[in-house]
Amino acid sequence: MDLNFLFISVLNGVVYGAFLLLTSLGLSLVFGLGRVVNFAHGALYALGGYALVEVMRRTGLGYWPALTAAPLVVFPVALAIERATIFPIRQRPDIYTLLVTFGVSFMVIGAIEQTWGTGTTLLTTPAPFTGTLDVLGNQYPRYRLFAAAVSLLVSAGVFALVQLTPVGLRIRAITDDAEMAEALGIDTKRLLTLVFGGAASLAAFAGALGAPIFAVHPDMGMSILLDSFLAVILGGLGNLPGSAIGAFVVALTKSIGGGYVADWSIAFLFVVVAVVLIVRPTGVFGRGRVA
Amino acid sequence: MKTERLALLVLLALALATLGHPAGAADESIRIGVLTIRSGPASPIGDDILAGIETATKMQGKVLGRPIELIVEDSLFNPQNAVTKATKLVQQNRVAAVLGTSTIEALALLPVADRLAVPIITSNAGAAAITRQRCNTWVFRTNPDELMSVASLQQLIAQTPKLQKAKWFTLGHDYPWSRLVGGSVKAVKDIAYVGETFAPLDTTDWAPFIAQARTAGATAVIMPVTLGTPLLQFIQQAHEFGLTKEAVLVSPIGLPDWLVAKLGPTSTNVVSAGSWAAWRYEEQEPATREFNEAFYKQHGRVSGMQSLQSASAATLLYQAMTKAGSAEPAAVVRALETVDVKTPVGPLKFQPGGRQALSPLFLGPYEPLNPPRYGAQFAQRAEAFVASKSLTQSAKESGCNLK
């Protein structure tokens, strides 16, 4: 076995996993808090990419300020989406929100196509992360390493927020028992709106961060949405640490599988997820809710 | 009484006017259906196809003294919808022919072509079977098929010393065409073929596959990747990983010009065989230049391959109608079989006894244009590879047995 190839495959998986972590955490948070299976998450990821491009174009600012602005632009859009579509049907069965977010996803993508067209925008890698870096004798893109590090840092921030702050305490309380949390005076509806906005901002940040690698186009969120769902299902719906591990399992399976058995890598991934769903419907790491 | 007489006169005048202008008379338009992709991610392809037909139609003016009316329908790039829309065009709109189809629509229309009974001239369909094993009396094709493209790729390798000495690796999407391309490269005599990998169709991160090409020590990577965003992503990521410093990227059918514009200088890492560089045929072919200029005037951009091919299909159709002296479908089909016309991709006619046009292909690297032409700053150098070399079998030998 070529150990260097294995090393590169693992590195590719870790980099993609770090990126997937950002989108998976948002999905998991929203499900845990409001039992909302958010199919619009991928569209909001795409909206982040377009927000980045639009801020750069309108303001003439470079990539870095636009990267910071993109999630801020998407945040109010997500709040409006939640208030207009999810908020009114929160008391209804879960399938309602699933169908609504599915529809919202198409509406957001349609709006993107109407506003910016169906074409693809390529972004050059921003300085100072252009070119490659020597990683144990392998030339590896600097920007990918940077993006992975940023993703990990932001994800760590989300974990810290949930675990160490009063807001996080409320989020965990609602995730554990929403009715009891409400009885204790926690405004669950308001918190869900804010968390929905926050999760969308995370997705938007991921879309903007990934833009120089994956390009910006209306369907850019579809593939990442599927991978994120797989990660969240593997880890346990609503289980944040589980989702994090799920993200890396999905990414490493795709990367190592793609490297060694490209034809079967996707099939293998789906078999793993199917087995998990059959054997442990609450995810490998449990504690998640069964929808 | 006066009013009644006046009404009678008006009715009489109307009746006379109708008698004087029977169906098919000089001021009645000839309706042509354009069935192409008008929405979704693949809509840029449909934009180019429609734009080419529009320019060719404008350049043509009238046919048989009658104006041409284009009736456009969105295929949604979906086979069932393509059949529905084609049926609507024929039965409801009474079109004389259908233009604008790509592979998905053309394959979908083959089983219903006899029922539709109008000429269908596809200009963007690669599947060889359309004009070979599954050829149909009503279905013609102007663009080179996938096997002709493969022959041009083999010629490109054979005539380029750098490519002959290279270590070849196939990196493409996991579908039959990619394997056909990989197999065709493997079949070239005396070249070093060091490996292949086929990525799932929804791949957005090409890192695992690029790693394989690098580990194999590839110095020429043939990339049968779906045109559009996936190909853009792949080339961008190959550049990002530095693969373009180690290996030349070879496109088996070429890059669309809008894609070249997005890639900019990165496109100069690509060498291509195929039909995309057709617009640069203008350096040899005045008809191509004339079309390019008219296209640029009308649409403000360089005419891509799909525009040139769809325009050629429209030109062939209009000339066949002129030759037949009628827009009647069966007469037009007979005329198409023998028509020989100067089109935007050069002089064109259909293979004797078949439905495949003898279209040229083009070989060469991508290069900067100084000065830019029609707004294009980069484009493939176009060395023509004539159809007599890419389509060596007769229609019958290639499996086409028309009734």
Image (spheres, coloured by chain):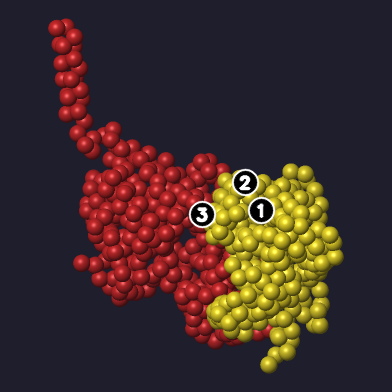
Residue B366 visible to an observer of this rendering: no
Determine whether, in the image, residue A283 is placed left or right of residue A130: left
Please state which of residues A195 and B361 is positioned toward the viewer in this rendering: A195
Cα separation, mark 1 vs mark 3, equals 17 Å
Residue placed under numbered mark 2 in the picture: A84
Q: Are marks 3 and 2 in contact (CB under 8 Å)?
A: no
Q: Residue pushed farthest top?
A: B2
Query: From the viewer's perspective, is the residue at label 3 or at label 2 nearer?
Result: 2
Chain A appears what colour?
Answer: yellow
Of the image marks 1 and 2, the number of the one nearer the N terminus: 1
Query: From the viewer's perspective, is the residue at label 1 or at label 2 nearer?
Result: 2
Q: Residue at x 29, y 54 (%)?
A: B119
Please state which of residues B297 and A236 is positioned toward the viewer in this rendering: A236
Q: Residue at x 20, y 28 (%)?
A: B18
Q: Residue pushed farthest front?
A: A183
Check the residue under mark 1 and report the chain it is in.
A
Q: Do the residues at pointers 1 and 2 share their chain?
A: yes
Q: Are marks 1 and 3 in contact (CB under 8 Å)?
A: no
The amino acid type, in three-letter code, at marker 3 is Gly
Check the residue under mark 3 and report the chain it is in.
B
Residue B81 visible to an observer of this rendering: yes
Residue placed under numbered mark 1 in the picture: A47
Residue placed under numbered mark 3 in the picture: B40
The amino acid type, in three-letter code, at marker 2 is Ala
On the image, the x and y values in percent for residue A97 come to 58, 56
Please state which of residues B62 and B392 is positioned toward the viewer in this rendering: B62
* Residue A260 image-quadrant placement: bottom right
Chain B appears what colour?
Answer: red
Query: Is the residue marked by circle 1 packed among few (<14), some (14-19), or many (20+) residues within 10 Å?
Result: many
